[in-house]
Structures are given as C-alpha cells and as structure tokens.
Image (cartoon, coloured by chain):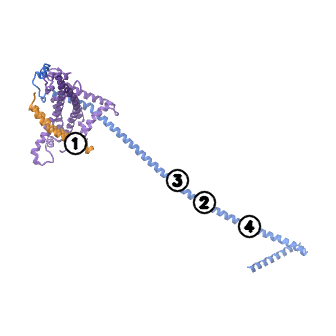
Chain colours: A blue, B orange, C purple
Amino acid sequence: MQNLIFLAEGTEPTEGGHAPENPLGFVPVEFALSLVTFGILLFLIWKYVAPRFEQTFAERTQAIEGGIAAAETKQAEADAKLAELEKQLGDARHEAARIREEAREQGAQIVAEMRETAQAESARIVEHGKAQIEAERQQAVTSLRAEVGALATGLAGRIVGESLEDEARQSRVVERFLTDLEASNGAASGSVN
Amino acid sequence: MDGNLNMIGYGLAAIGPGVGIGLIFAAYISGVARQPEAQGRLQSIAILGFALAEALAIIGIALAFVL
Amino acid sequence: MFGITMAESEGGEFLAPGPNSFDFSEVPLFHIGGLAVTKPMVQLLLGAVIVFVFFYAAARRATLVPGRLQFAGEAAYGMVRNSIGRDIIGSKDYAKFVPYLVTLFFFLLINNAFASIPAIQFPTFSRASMAYALAGLSWVIYNGVGIHKHGLLGYLKLQSVPSGVSPVMYPLLVPLEFFSNILVRPATLALRLFANMFAGHLLLILFSTGGLFLLEYGGIGYVAGPLAWVLAIAISFLELLVQFLQAYVFTLLNAMYISGALADEH
C-alpha cells in the first residue's frame, strides 16, 4: 500500500474543499438551463424544421400520387382506345363478312341470270334455226316443185315428143301430176300408217 | 476500502429487475422468432415492459443514494 | 482537457471514481455575472446548437428530390416521426407531437453521445437536474394533453381506474395506478436516463483510471492494467449502444404516455 501513499502526493481530488454532492441532488441552475435550452430548441425545430419536412413529405406524396393518378388516366385512355379499336375491328370484320355474303349472293344471282340468259339465247337460237330450216325447207319445196315440174315436163315432152311448150297447159299438167302424186303419196302413207 | 452499505443493498435489489428484464426480452425474442411479422408490435410492448421492470431498479438506485 | 485532469485527480490512493467525478461546481469553465458556467451547461447548449444547425441545414432548401444532407435529415426526422410518432400515438393525432418527439430524441442523443466524443467525454444527462427538467416537461405535456382531451376528472379516471377489474379491487388498485401513472412515471423517466448515463460514465472512468493505477502499481498490474483498458474500450462500444437506446426509450415512453393519455378508454 506504500505505492498508494506515494501516489497520493499528486493533486488532491475535487472533494478537497466542499462536502460531496449527492448525484441526485437538485441544482436549480441546471434544471432551468436544461428546460430553457430544450424549450428554445423545440420552438426552433417546431417553427423552422418540422413544417418544411412535412411540406416536403406532403409534396412528395402528392407528386407520387399525382403520378399514379396520371398513369391511371393514361391507362384508362389506352383501355378506352383499345376497346374502341377492337370495336372498330369487330365492325370491320362484320362488314367484311356482310360484303362477302352479299357478293356471294350477287354472284349466285349473276350466275343464275347468266344461265337464264344463255338458256334463253340458246333457245332463241335453236328456235331461230328451226324457223330458218323450216323456211328453207319451204323454199326448197317451192323451188323443187317449180323445177321438178319444168324438168319433168321437159323430160316427158322429149320422151313423148309432144310439145309442151304451151305454158298454161304445161302447168296444168304438172299440177295435175303433182296432185296425183301427193294423193298417191298420201294414200300410200295412209295405208302404211 | 470505503463504501456504503446502501450500495450493497442496491446491488441485491437490482437482481430482481435484472431477472425480470431478461425474461421480458427472452419472451420478445421467442415471439419474434415465431412470428417475425409481429416484430413492430412486440417491440413497443417489450420496451414498455422493460421500462416498467427497470423502474424498480431505478427506484432502488434513487433510494440507495437518498437514504 | 478537463476530462484528463479529472482522471489524474482520481489517481490518489486509488480513490475509486464516485459521484465526485460528476461534480463540476468547483471547477467552472467561466463565470457570467455571478453564475458559474460548468462544462455540462456548455454541452447542453452545444448539443442544442448542433441539433438545430443539422436540421436547419437539412430542411433549408428542401426539394422533392433530396440532396445528401437533406436525405440524412429526412431519414432522421422520418425515423422518429414514423416509427415512434405514428406507430405509437396513431395516425390520427401524431402530427402535433412530431416536433416535440424529434427534438427530444435528437437532443438526448447528441447529449448522450457527448460521453463518447473525444475531448468532451461527459454525458450531459448524468447531471440529474438536467434529466429532471426533461422528465418534468414530459410529465407536463402528457398530463396536459390528457386533461385537455378528457377534462381533469375524466383524465384522472382514465389514468387511475383500471378497466376490466371488479370494483371490489378499486380501493387497492386505484391508488396504485395513480401512483404508478402520475407519480412514478416522471421519476423513472428522469432517473433511468440519469442512472444509465451516470453508471456508464462511472464504469468508463473506473476502468480507465483503474488501468492507469494498476500499471503504475507494477507487478501483476502490468497485465491487469492493459486488460482493464481493453475492457474500457469494449465498454465504450456498449455505451454507444446504451446512449442510443436511452434516447430512444425516453422518446418512445413519451410517445406511449401521450398515446395513453389520448386513449379513449383504458
């Protein structure tokens, strides 16, 4: 313990002059100073710092929420536009289908009409042909009848030697002959039938 | 050796709150381990319990100095 | 600096550091009029200045996209605002109390941190009177808030009459609740802060001066002295945690008391 005594020659501790202070003791100056300092600091923070931070927080929140709102509006717009486009597309599809249907009907109608026309035409042509043939046949019959008479009379005159130059007579003879011929023809055909 | 019997008494008195604070935080830790999402709620409750238990030790130290 | 002379003055016949290490009344830094200004008083003012300058600089040009300083200020402010104010008091009423809680937390934090800042190395609130002041203010605020909301009788009923207990127990419980909620709260608030700061600083002095003494003592002291200093360093880190925790707990309990005083029913 001699070292202790040696060391004790150093500076005397603070308790030298006065009675030891109770650490829980109340010191009015410190109490008041603490209160005042804290009060001033509180006032300054309350006045100058908190409002600005709160304002910044509020602005930031608003900015973010505004951004969200704007994005939502844009999204809604885009949705509306998309819906509109889809509707238009649907309409167009519908329209196209309608046109296609119409065209098909029209085509069918045209084909039918054409067919009808063609049939009519062909019938007309056939009719025309028939009529022509008939007319030509009549003509042929007529001319034949004339020529056959002349030929036959010429031939018969030559064979018989009798002049059949006289027109009237000649034609009378031919008529008679043809009539006979037709009659016999008719009888023959009648008997055949 | 210079000292005060009060301080020995305070040392003994501090055992109780010490055990109490230990129990509070043990319960808090196992609570958070079971349900980590409840940490926020448990924390304030644990600190309130800690403050109440510590109040005993604080009353002890005050009395140790005052008596 | 002053702290060093204090440590050496402890050196004597190994005078264990005690309450005297916290008594500056014999060694004031300077005098203003008849008033002796001591180190803790200067620290108190310095702490207030630091807190205000930091927040003022951070909030001065507040913009939507924060700079580095503003971001730090907002993070600090927002931490107390959201995790203490909004979560405890509730989103309806907390806005009014945010400046108070923020000021309280950072004022306490910087003053506690003075215990570990080189060349200052003294926790301001190990002066009990200063802690009394803040606790007294808290007491006035939470009781004032409660009385303002519920009226004096309603508030006393809220704080003293526990709900869900049969009236038979009232004679026992009502005085107890009153004692606990009205009288003990400010005392524990002040003493918790004071005692933690006081004990932490005392431990640090003990290990530092004890280490020095052991080294000078020689013999086994050549081993034990440095060991004590290593422990002192470890305790310094523990103290950093305690400093933060005490500021946090003080503010959190303030918020809880305010929230309790505002509660509609117990």
Tell me the distance, in whole angstroms, between the alpha carbons under discs 4 and 2: 32 Å
Circles 4 and 2: CB atoms closer than 8 Å: no
The foreground one among C62 and C9 is: C9
- The residue labelled by disc 2 is A111
- The residue labelled by disc 4 is A133
Disc 3 on helix, strand or loop?
A: helix
* Residue B2 higher or lower than A122, as above or below: above
Q: Are marks 1 and 2 on the same chain?
A: no
Q: Nearer the viewer, mark 4 or mark 3?
A: 3
- Residue B28's disc is 1
Residue ID at (69%, 65%): A126
Q: Amino acid at mark 3?
A: Ala
In the figure, is residue A126 to the left or right of C227? right
Disc 1 on helix, strand or loop?
A: helix
Q: Earlier in the sequence, mark 3 or mark 2?
A: 3
Density class for disc 3 (Cα within 10 Å; few <14, some 14-19, many ≥20) is few
Tell me the distance, in whole angstroms, between the alpha carbons under discs 3 and 1: 73 Å
In the figure, is residue C86 to the left or right of C158? right
Quadrant for the C terminus of chain C in the image: top left
Query: Which chain is home to disc 4?
Result: A
